[in-house]
Each structure stands twice: as C-alpha cells, then as structure tokens.
Image (cartoon, coloured by chain):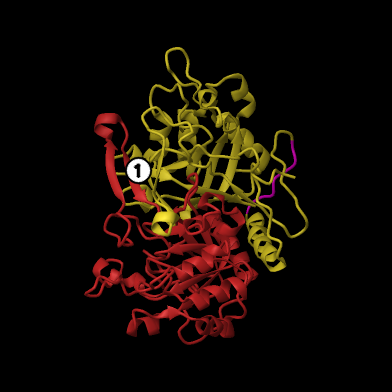
Chain colours: A red, B yellow
Amino acid sequence: MCAPSVIDTVRQHLSRRHFLAALGGSVAAAVAAPAPGLGQEKPVRLAKGFRDVYDLTHTLSPKLPVFTAFKPVQIRQRFTIAKDGFFANEITFDEHTGTHLDGPVHFVANGSSADRIPVDRLFAPLAVVSIEVRAAKDADATMRVDDLLAWEKRYGRLPRGAFVAMHSGWDARVGTPDRFLNRDAKGVMHAPGFSEEAASFLVKERDIVGAGVDTLSLDGGAAQKFVAHLALLGAGKYGVELLANLARVPASGATLIVGGPKHEGASGGPVRVFAVV
Amino acid sequence: MCAPSVIDTVRQHLSRRHFLAALGGSVAAAVAAPAPGLGQEKPVRLAKGFRDVYDLTHTLSPKLPVFTAFKPVQIRQRFTIAKDGFFANEITFDEHTGTHLDGPVHFVANGSSADRIPVDRLFAPLAVVSIEVRAAKDADATMRVDDLLAWEKRYGRLPRGAFVAMHSGWDARVGTPDRFLNRDAKGVMHAPGFSEEAASFLVKERDIVGAGVDTLSLDGGAAQKFVAHLALLGAGKYGVELLANLARVPASGATLIVGGPKHEGASGGPVRVFAVV
C-alpha cells in the first residue's frame, strides 16, 4: 500500500469507484503492462476494480527551492471573510517556480508559448526512467542514452507521443532546499539532469511530446550551457521541472495529464500534473 | 465537425490515436451515453477510434472580464533571450481571475483550501445543464431545481461524484467585457448563476464534487448575497467559474479533469480544465 498522502484513496461510493476504475482500466489497456523486475516501481493493486490517481505536483510555497534567477512565490492575503465576506490572496511568481512547465518559447524566439501547446499533447503515455542509484553517488549524474535504451529493453520501445521523466531521487530533498540546490563552495549547483545526447536522442530518434525532471532544470545543475533545454525546446517539445512523487509511479503504463499554464504568451508556468493508472 | 480551435484534432500517429481512443473509450463506457434529443449538444463522432479532448479554459489575459473586487492579471516580462539567454515573465493575479477554482475556504473559515482538495475529486463525470434559451431573454435567469430535474429526465440521475456546469451562453460574450459584465445604470451586474435552491438541492439531494458556471460567479450577477457560494462551498464542494466551451461538450458522458491550483493555502486560483470524451 502506498501512503495516503501520495495516492488518493478511491471514493467510497460504488458508482464513483466504477467510474474511476473504467477510466483507469482503459488507460492500462492502451499501453504495455509493466513487467515485473528489479528496480521497478511496483504497480499498486488495490481491490479489484480500483485504480489510482497520482499527484506529481509539489505544493507551491515560498519554502520550495528556486532556480538562481528566480524569486520564491509571494502569497499575500488581500481579502478576509471578516472584512470582505470572502477570503482571497494575490499571487506573484516568476513563471519557472514550483512544479512548472517550460514552453518552447522559453528558449526559442519563434517557439510556441506555453498557452498554445496543443491540448492533446498534454495527455501522454508516461515513461519514468530512473537514474536514482547513480545520482545517489554522483550529484552530477545525467540521463544518458544508455539509460533510455535500458528502459526500452525492459518495457518496450517508447510509445509515440510519450513524455519521458527523469527520476533522480531529488524529490526526497525538496524539504531541505540547501541539499536540493546542493551548491559547492563556488556557488555552483550540483544536481542531475538530461545529457545533451539523451535529449537529442529523444527528439531525433524517438517521438516524444516532452520531458521532465524531479530537479530544478532539464539540464544538470553544473551544466555550463542550457544544452538539454535547447535540444528539447528547440525541437518544439515542452519540459516539466520539479516533478513530485515519480518514485511512486509505475515506470511504464501510466498516463500523464498536464494542466499546463494558459496565461497569454506564457514562457511557462506552474502546472498541476497528474498520472493516472 | 467542431472548430479546430475548440476540439484539438487527434494526433497523426497511429499509436497515439489508439492511445487517446482507448482513454476516451473507457470514459464513454463508464457513464451513460448521451441520448439523442432536442437541445442536446451533439456528440462529435470523428473516424472510428478517435476521441476528443475539450479545453474548457479561457486564455488568462488582462483583457478578460473580472469580478468587481479584483484586478486583471498582470504579465511582466523580466527576462529576454537577447539579454539573459531565456525568456520569462513575472505574473501577478488575484486568485479569482480567469477560468478559476473556488475552494471551500474562499467563503468558509474552516473549509478546505484549494490545494488540499483530494485529487480524485478533480476527476468527475461532467453534467452540462443549459439555461441558454432562458438566459438569452433574461440576464438574471438562474439555474433552478427544475432545470436539474429536466436534465435528469433526459440523461438519468446525476452520477455520484458529478460536477454540474451551468451553460448560460455567457461564454460568447467573453470578448466584449461590457456585454459580459452587463452592468445597469446603477453599476449592478446582470448575469446568470445558480439559485440558492438549486445549489442546496445539489448538496443535499445529490452527491456532487462541485459546480461551475460560464459566468464570473456561482451566484447571479445581481444577487445581493453569495447564497449559492455559501450553499456549495459551505458543504465542502468546490466551484469553477468562467468556464469556456461548454456549448461544445456533450451534456452527459464527458469526464471533467480539473488541474486545480496548488499554491499553499489557496482560496482558489486559475485552473486548466479539460473535458475528455
């Protein structure tokens, strides 16, 4: 059983259970079932007919680690029930804070803004590729082509239209921003990301809609240039950074649903991201 | 055929088509198929095996109409590719602008904040109840219990865990804020919403997760008090306001997916909302 905080328990009502089960059932039928094997996230099997929704979104708060250039989100109470009859805040954020999407235009002048990404690309077969074991020993570990091929050897070729998520284990550090940012004496961050080769392989040799990481950046923390960003966004793909709970999601067989930002001309922005199984 | 801007065309890749089709197929199986009949939004049937994703989200821009108390969203460019190597904006908004969610805490001191709504409640059978004909003649028309019962007579009892959306036709006014707000000489807005009776019926006699409108408020524009808000949010339900494209979605048989806001302590916030069929 997974922790209730991670996997939402299904509803107590029979009709609701049937509803969710049928939704999950067909998704499972659409992609290969995860094969049993070492290092694989175990699919959660609750009572017959139950399926799960995973929330891959960190709660956006000023306590979350942010990339060097950006400020933490600001949440200011403007209205109170006592004074105004209702409670409401004003929110200010740099677009690339929290669990967030990078649209092609973030790095490519003529690229698509995040609000204009075609909606069907926000629904994708999810491939979670773990480099956790290597990243635990080397904070500069990157996703390599070999890692992608090893995933394919176990689960089959990446489905067309897939979203590929790097699971590095960095999620577990999110409550301790210093460990998450992992700066050295010179202030350089050390955290995993995609190698340029792996990003290029995905856009040239496979057909993906986007790629994501559980760290702050598609590129490794110590990368001198935004090579993975440029390879992915330059090819019209989108990125999702600071993903949560990838350790819980099956490596193959889940469906990603990206509630992408839709403010006008967005370079990106906070998202609500689910995986359904 | 629906306009490409409303319904995203499915992918050209066969495997992707099969993926979306299987997702949609099971959703359709989970709830009653829409019965043919006058006034019903026609289900869109593309080639066999195709299914649709509808985007129920307005693009969040300073041009959108806003409720009296709130300011339009502010989008400020802070980083440019020429100067910084990447493009990014800073965004400021009052939580209740754009297509947005109202969490129970918006009106109820001890209610759930929007970020804590259980994830499975953000996936719901969608019932679209139209009062468009009446609203075209009377801007103060409200959703009545009779309207809900007429929907049930045609499509069957509201499924447990349903989300009930009022379609008033106000969506068509969104490009002309003056017509949308529809203020009289005294500054009072006139726009449709839920009657207190209909809201109470839904929380007491049926089992819903939330309710939505294509106007700015769950309550009618001219309502003196927030009676529909209090009935719905007071019962722990959530609201979604300024929904788009309800005219296109089947009245019964779609699944709502709400990419709800997840900033800490949110009274609500802009959402990305989809319907899948």
Within-10-Å neighbours for mark 1: few <14, some 14–19, many 20+: many
Q: Main secondary structure of the magenta part?
A: loop
Q: Chain of mark 1?
A: B
Secondary structure at badge 1 equals loop
Give the residue displayed 56% in from the left and 44% down from the top.
Answer: B56
Q: Is residue B272 visible?
A: yes
Along the line of sight, the residue nearer the viewer: A201 or A90:
A201
Q: Position of residue A169 (x, y in %)?
A: 37, 75
Q: Position of residue B182 (x, y in %)?
A: 51, 21
Give the residue at the far right of this rendering.
B47
Give the residue displayed 21% in from the left and 75% down from the top.
Answer: A185
Along the line of sight, the residue nearer the viewer: A266 or A262:
A266
Give the residue displayed 45% in from the left and 84% down from the top.
Answer: A39
The stretch in magenta equals B31-37
Q: Tell me, yes or no, whether the highlighted magenta stretch contains residue B34.
A: yes
Name the kind of residue labelled 1 in the image.
Ser
Quick check: B248 above or below A52?
above
Q: Is residue A121 left or right of residue B199?
A: right
Along the line of sight, the residue nearer the viewer: B156 or B54:
B54
Residue at the spot of label 1: B267
Q: Which picture quadrant has residue A213? A: bottom left
Give the residue at the far left of this rendering.
A185
Q: Is residue A18 visible?
A: no
Give the residue at the far front of this rendering.
B82
Q: Position of residue B177 (x, y in %)?
A: 51, 27
Q: Which picture quadrant has residue B84? A: bottom left
